[in-house]
Amino acid sequence: MSHNSESDAAASLNQPTINESLSRLPSVNSKTSDLENEKQTARLDAEKLPDDLLETEPRWWESKSLEDRPLDGWYAWSVVISGCFMLMFSMGCVNSYGTYQTYYHLHQFPDEPLSNLAWVGTLQFAVMNIFGIPAGILCERMDTRLVTFVGGVIMAVALIIASFCDSAPWKLILTQGIVFALGAALVFVPSTSIPSQWFTKRRALAIGIVVAGSGIGGLWLTPATRAMIDQLGTGWALRITGIIVFVVNSIASLFMRGRIKVKSREKIVDMSIFRDIRFILICAGGTCGMCGYFTPFFSMPSFAEEIVGKSNSFGNNLLTVINAASTVGRIATGEVAAIFGTINTMVTCTFVAGLSILVLWLPFETTGTLIACAIIYGVFCGGFIGLIPVVLSELWGVHRISTIIGLLYMANFVGAMIGAPSSSGILDNIGHGTNFKPSIAFSGTFMVCGSLFFLGLRIAADKNLFKKV
C-alpha cells in the first residue's frame, strides 16, 4: 500500500510537468484557429457588404485560391508596384505634354494659336476624370487585370496614331488628347482603388507609393521626351513612348487583381452616397483644393523668370523641385497618417500647402522664399493628392472604392477646370500679365478653403478632435 501511495504521489508531482511540455507542442486546433483567423481577416472589408452582394463562387477568370493570399503580404506589394508603374506612364505622359506643346507651337503648327494646342493637355486631364465613373463601374463588374490591359492598349494605340497626325491640330486633340485619356482612365482608377483592397495595416503608405508614380513619371519622362524630340522628332518620340507604355502596362496589369468580389448591382451607380454629408464635404474640399492646386505648377516658373529675374533653366528646375517634393510627400505622408490618422493628416497637408502659397510666395519676390515655397508646397500638396483615396476606403470600405473614386474625380475635374483657366484669366485681366499676386492669392485661398471643408469632414467623422482619425 505504501508503495502504491508513493507511486501516485510521484505521478501527481510529474503531471504538471507533462502538461507543461504538451502545452509547448504545436496544437492542431491552434493551427486551425490561426487559419480561420486569417480567413476572417481576409474578409475584413467584405463583411460590411449585404449578403446578396457577396459572390459565393469565384468568377470564371478568378482563381479559387484568391482568399489564401494574405492581406499586407508579398502579393499586395506587387499590386502596389504595378500601380506605381501604371501611373508613372499614364500620368507621366499627361505631365510631359508641355514638351510636345512647345514643339508643336514653334515648329509643327507655328500659325496655330497656343490656346488651341493647349486643348490636348486640357482634354487629357478632363476626359480622364470624366471617364472615372465608367472606369469604376468596369472595375466592379469585370476583371481589373483585363480593364487595365485594355487601357494600356488604348493609350499605346492613341500615341502611335498621333505620331502620324502632323497635318492638323484637331487630329492631335482627338488622338493624343481624348483617346489617350480614355485609356488612361481605365488604368488610373484601378491603380488608385485596387491596392486598398489588399491592405489593412499600411494602406496609407501603399496608396502613397502608388500615386507617387505620377510624380516619378513627371520627373524623368519630361526630360526623356525632350531628348527624344530633339534627336528624333515628335513622331518617333510618340511611337517609342507608345511602345514602352504597352510593354510596361501589359506586364503590370497581370498583378492588378481585385480582391473583393461583388455581384453586379441593379443600380449602375449608387447615388445614395450623395445623401452622406461626409461625401459632400470631401467632394467640396477636393473641388476647392483642385481649384488652387495647379497654379504653382503653371505660374511659378514664369514668376521666377519675369519677376525674380531668373533664367529659363531655373524656372524649369523649380518645376522639377515641386515634382520631386510632391513625390516625397505622397510617400512620407502615408507613414505620418499611420501615426496621427488619415483625415487629420489630410487636413494638415491641405492647410499647410495653401498657407505656404499665401505666406512664402504671395508677399515675397526673392529666390530663397520661392525655393522654400516650392519645396514646402510640393511636399504637402503631395499629401493632399495621396491621402484622398485612403480616406475614401476608410470611410466607405474598399468594396465601393472604385465607383466612389470615380465620383470624386468628377468633383476634382470641376475644380481643375474652374481653377486653371480662372487663374490664367486673373493673371491676364486683373494682373495684366505681369502682376502675379491676384492669381497667387486665388490659388492659396482655395487651398485653405479646401482644408476647411476637410476639417468639417473630420468633425463629421468624429467630434473628438484629439482622436486619431
Image (spheres, grey):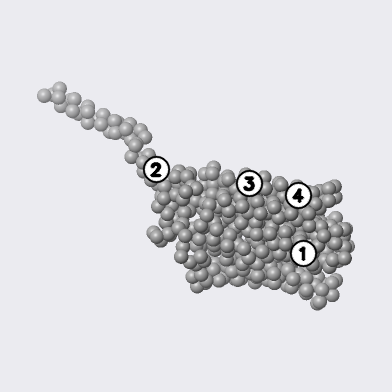
Crowding around mark 3 (Cα neighbors within 10 Å: few <14, some 14 to 19, many 20+) is many
Reply above or below: 363 against 249: below
Report which residue position mark 2 lands on: 34
On the question of residue 371 being in view, the answer is no
Reply above or below: 221 against 25: below
- Marks 4 and 2 sit apart, C-alpha to C-alpha, by 52 Å
- Marks 2 and 1 sit apart, C-alpha to C-alpha, by 61 Å
Mark nearer the viewer, 2 or 3: 3
Q: Which mark is residue 239?
A: 4
Mark nearer the viewer, 4 or 2: 4
Name the N-terminal-most of marks 2 and 1.
Answer: 2
Q: Which mark is residue 250?
A: 3
Report which residue position mark 1 lands on: 170
Q: Secondary structure at mark 2?
A: helix
Crowding around mark 2 (Cα neighbors within 10 Å: few <14, some 14 to 19, many 20+) is few
Q: Residue at image x 73%, y 68%?
A: 420
Q: Secondary structure at mark 4?
A: helix
Q: Going by the image, does 4 lie left or right of 422?
A: left
Q: Residue at image x 63%, y 46%?
A: 250
- Marks 2 and 3 sit apart, C-alpha to C-alpha, by 37 Å
**In the image as oriented, which residue stretches furthest toward the left?**
1
Amino acid at the residue labelled 4: Arg
Amino acid at the residue labelled 2: Asp
Q: Residue at image x 57%, y 66%?
A: 407
- Marks 3 and 1 sit apart, C-alpha to C-alpha, by 29 Å
Name the N-terminal-most of marks 4 and 2.
Answer: 2
39 or 358, nearer to the observer: 39
Name the N-terminal-most of marks 2 and 3.
Answer: 2
Amino acid at the residue labelled 3: Ser
